[in-house]
Image: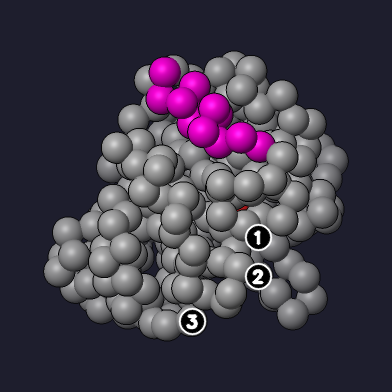
Amino acid sequence: MKFSANLGFLWNDRPLPAAIKAAKEAGFDAVECHWPYAVPASETKAALDETGLKMLGLNTVRGNVTIGENGLSALPGREEEARAAIDQAIQYATEISAGAIHVMAGNSSGPRARKAFIENLVNACDNAGSDITILIEPLNHYNAPGYFLSTVEQAADIIREVAKPNLKLMFDFYHVQIMGGDVTRRFEAALPHIGHVQIASVPDRGSPDHGELDYSFTLRRVRELGWAQPIGAEYLPANGAVPDLAWLASFKD
Ligand SMILES: O=C(O)[C@@H](O)C(=O)CO
Ligand SMILES: [Mg+2]
């Protein structure tokens, strides 16, 4: 299997270009991040070019994080800000040739929120063009209480309704296990919609070699089902920002 280092959590004690280099040295096949915007895209691109790693994805900004905002795209009345966040992400992703943008929904619920989310996703898909995949990610209700999107089934409904070929599901096993489990069957059912896969141990969101999910089984099944893209290692290192990587050698090709 191939793995992508999620630099939102791994090596997040250093500037993004240095984190990209650390991921390369550690043997990762790709990188992904959360919010790279403080670093000029040219600097991120230079580190990607130097290491030969691809940036698989980045997120739209969350809004006012000091009051707990967690995305803007499913917030009725905030359409202008949501569009600006999507435009910013598309511009950054284009400059660094990133593969995907995770459009963050935000904390909301109900039909008006759903309508706003769908309209923003249509706009994101149309403006991103065919080289950038737009991702939506269900988040669990412990880490993201009140978040609009919490299950893969809800996300699949939205993807069907938006009906754009570049809208896909970010299937994060950590969240999916917490929100109902049965992860192997649910992965298989969602496979046609999946655009990226992420992992972490459950419930502590640590390295994927312990906890209630057995990734040596789960990832074998993922591979058998034909998934060949790098899997996002999105976990919280046990001791700060430098990750424990014993798991990587045993899971990698
Ligand atoms: O799982 C997560 O939390 C991330 O993938 C993310 O992008 C939202 O913070
Ligand atoms: Mg995730």
Magenta segment, principal secondary structure?
Answer: helix
Q: Which residue lies under the disc numbered 2?
A: 63
For marks 3 and 1 on the same chain, the one whose residue lies earlier in the sequence? 3
Number of on-image labels: 3
For marks 2 and 3 on the same chain, the one whose residue lies earlier in the sequence? 3
Q: Magenta segment, which residues?
A: 213-224
Corner quadrant of residue 159 = top right
Q: Residues within 10 Å of mark 3 (few under 14, many from 20)?
A: some
For marks 2 and 1 on the same chain, the one whose residue lies earlier in the sequence? 2
User: Ligand 1: does it lie within 8 Å of the C-beta at label 1?
Assistant: no
In front: mark 2 or mark 3?
Answer: 3
| Position of residue 117 measured from the top left corner of the image (x, y, whole percent) | 65, 44
- Identify which amino acid the numbered label 1 is placed on: Gly
Is 221 included in the stretch rendered in magenta? yes
Residue 95 makes an appearance in the image:
no
Corner quadrant of residue 229 = top left
Looking at the image, is 179 positioned above or below residue 49?
A: above
**Residue drawn where x is 49% and y is 39% of the image:** 197
Callout 2 touching callout 1 (CB < 8 Å) = yes
| Position of residue 153 measured from the top left corner of the image (x, y, whole percent) | 70, 26
Q: Nearer the viewer, residue 188 or 42?
A: 188
